[in-house]
Amino acid sequence: VSGVQFEGVTVGLAPVAGMCGQNSGAVSEDHSYNVLGLASTMAHEMGHNLGMSHDSTERRCHCEATEEQGGCVLAPRLKHGFPVGFSSCSVQDLHGFLQAGGGPCLYNEPLPDALYGGPVCGNLFLEPGETCDCGTVEVCHNPCCNATTCQLVSGARCAHGSCCSHCQIAAAGVRCRERMHECDLPELC
């Protein structure tokens, strides 16, 4: 996803059938204030990666959704709203891509505990070796967490959560969440 504005009406680029190859990848311009606009572009570009070409009348593509309803994801251009599905051509293209052996990397199952690229302090994810992660030094205002080292500051027992108060863990039994409705129970530390 890029904040850089592309030339003309282009809002995304991806190679057709590029998935798992050396040209695998796509770029999408963050072009819309509505998150569905960017999501639609990303789905369109991912479709290209997975072997899908643009829908066209020459290909006799059938799209369940009308243009007024948003049309299909691989339409050459969005006209009204956001696409709501894939056309018969897209389904056929994907089937052909997979039948021809495309996308073998899609079957690689990552190890659940494996971190690719290793832990990164400042990314807001608590990873092995970190006791807290409140973001980068510029954005972290948590007095309990050292943003440079992603370690709790001296004397701190916690850095966030509803049972963390002034860097200390609240006593057992302290209410940390009220009940939300009649079928719910309050939560306690």
Image (cartoon, rainbow, N blue to C red):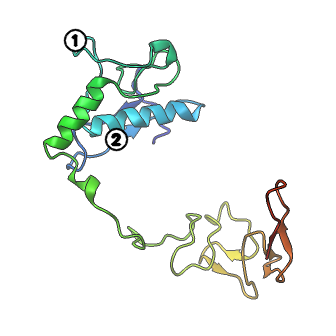
Number of marks drawn? 2
Q: Residue at x 64, y 72 (%)?
A: 147
Vertical side of 79 occupied by 82: above or below: below
Quadrant of image for the N terminus: top left
Q: 6 or 142, which is in the foreground?
A: 142
Is residue 90 visible in the rendered structure shown here? yes
Residue 57 against residue 175 in the figure, above or below: above
Q: Is residue 167 left or right of residue 94?
A: right
| Mark 1 or mark 2, whichever is nearer to me | 1
Q: Is residue 30 visible?
A: no
Task: Give the residue number, with chain letter if any, for mark 2.
Answer: 26
What secondary structure is found at the residue carrying circle 2?
Answer: loop
Q: CA distance from mark 1 to mark 2?
A: 26 Å
Tag 1, which secondary structure?
Answer: loop
Q: Quadrant of residue 13?
A: top left
Locate residue 62, reporting x and y percent.
Answer: 32, 17
The quadrant where residue 137 appears:
bottom right
Question: Can you say which quadrant of the picture contains the C terminus?
Answer: bottom right
Q: Residue furthest front?
A: 183
Q: Residue furthest left?
A: 100
Q: Amino acid at mark 2?
A: Ala
Residue at x 86%, y 71% (from the top left corner): 175
Question: Is residue 24 rendered to the left or right of residue 42?
Answer: left
Q: Is residue 2 left or right of residue 168?
A: left
The image shows residue 75 at horizontal and vertical percentages of: 36, 21
At label 1, counting other C-alpha atoms closer than 10 Å, the crowd grade (few under 14, some 14-19, many 20 or more) is few
Q: Residue 26 appears in which quarter of the rendering?
A: top left
Which tag, 1 or 2, sits closer to the chain's start? 2
Q: Label 1 sits on what residue type?
A: Glu
Residue 87 drawn at (x, y percent): 33, 24
- Badge 1 is on which residue? 58
